[in-house]
Image: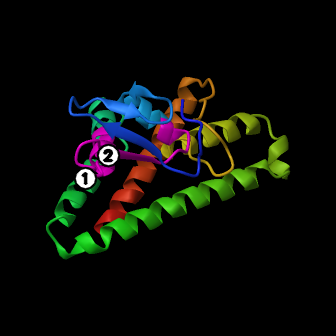
Amino acid sequence: MAAADPGKPLLIKRYASRRLYNTETSDYVTLEDIAAFIREGREVQIVDLKSGDDLTRQYLLQIIAEHESRGESVLPVDVLTDLVRSYTSQASTIVPQFLAMSFDMLREGQSKMMENMAKANPMSTMPGFEAMRAQQEAFFKAMTGGMMPGKGGAAEAPKQGGEDIDAMRRQLAEMQERLSKMGKG
C-alpha cells in the first residue's frame, strides 16, 4: 500500500474515466483502498487530473455515505438532520470548528483513558479486567477508525460473547445520544 512519506498527503489522481490512480504505487485504487489508507493514518488528496480541482471532500463524503448505507451507522439521524440544517443557517460558520474540536477531544480522551487503563492499578488484578480493557480499546478504535495516537493500524476486535457485544452496543447508543445532544446545543 502507501509507504512513501507518511507526513505528506498521498496524491490520488482521478482520470476522465473516473478511475482513481495512486501516484506513489502507480496503480489504480478503489474507494475502499482510500478508506484503508485513511484508517492507517495517512492523509489523502484526490485531484482531477485534467482540471486540477481538489476532489478530496467529495470522495470522503462518498466513503462515509457508502459505509452508512451498508448499515455501518455512526451518525444518528438527528445529527445528520442538524448537519443538513447547518448548511442553511448561521451555524454553517461554527459547525466545522465544533466538529473538529469534538473529534480532537474524543481522540485525546480515548488516548488518556487507554493510558490510565494500562497503568498498574488495583482493578487490574480483578478477573476479567484484561478482557474489559481489550473491549474498551477495540470500541474506541472502532469509533475513531483505528486512529489512536501512538498506535498503528486498524483495531482487531477481540472475540466476544453475546454479553460483551450487548455492552458495546449500549455504550455506542449512549455515545450517539451524547453526540446528538451536543448537536442540538
View extreme (left): residue? 88
Residue corresponding to mark 1: 80
Look at label 1 and name its amino acid.
Leu
Picture quarter with the C terminus: bottom left
- Residue, x 33% and y 32% (percent of image)? 20
Label placed on residue 145 = none
Mark 1 surroundings: few (<14), some (14-19) or many (≥20) residues within 10 A: few
Q: Is residue 31 left or right of residue 25?
A: left
Between label 2 and label 1, give the one nearer the viewer: 2
Residue corresponding to mark 2: 47
Q: Residue 94: horizontal and vertical position, in percent?
A: 31, 73
- Residue, x 29% and y 66% (percent of image)? 184
Magenta part of the chain: 37-64
Q: How is the image coloured?
A: rainbow
Mark 2 surroundings: few (<14), some (14-19) or many (≥20) residues within 10 A: some
Q: Is residue 52 magenta?
A: yes
| SS of the residue under disc 1 | helix
Look at label 2 and name its amino acid.
Val
Q: Residue 90: horizontal and vertical position, in percent?
A: 20, 76
- Image quadrant assignment for residue 28: top left
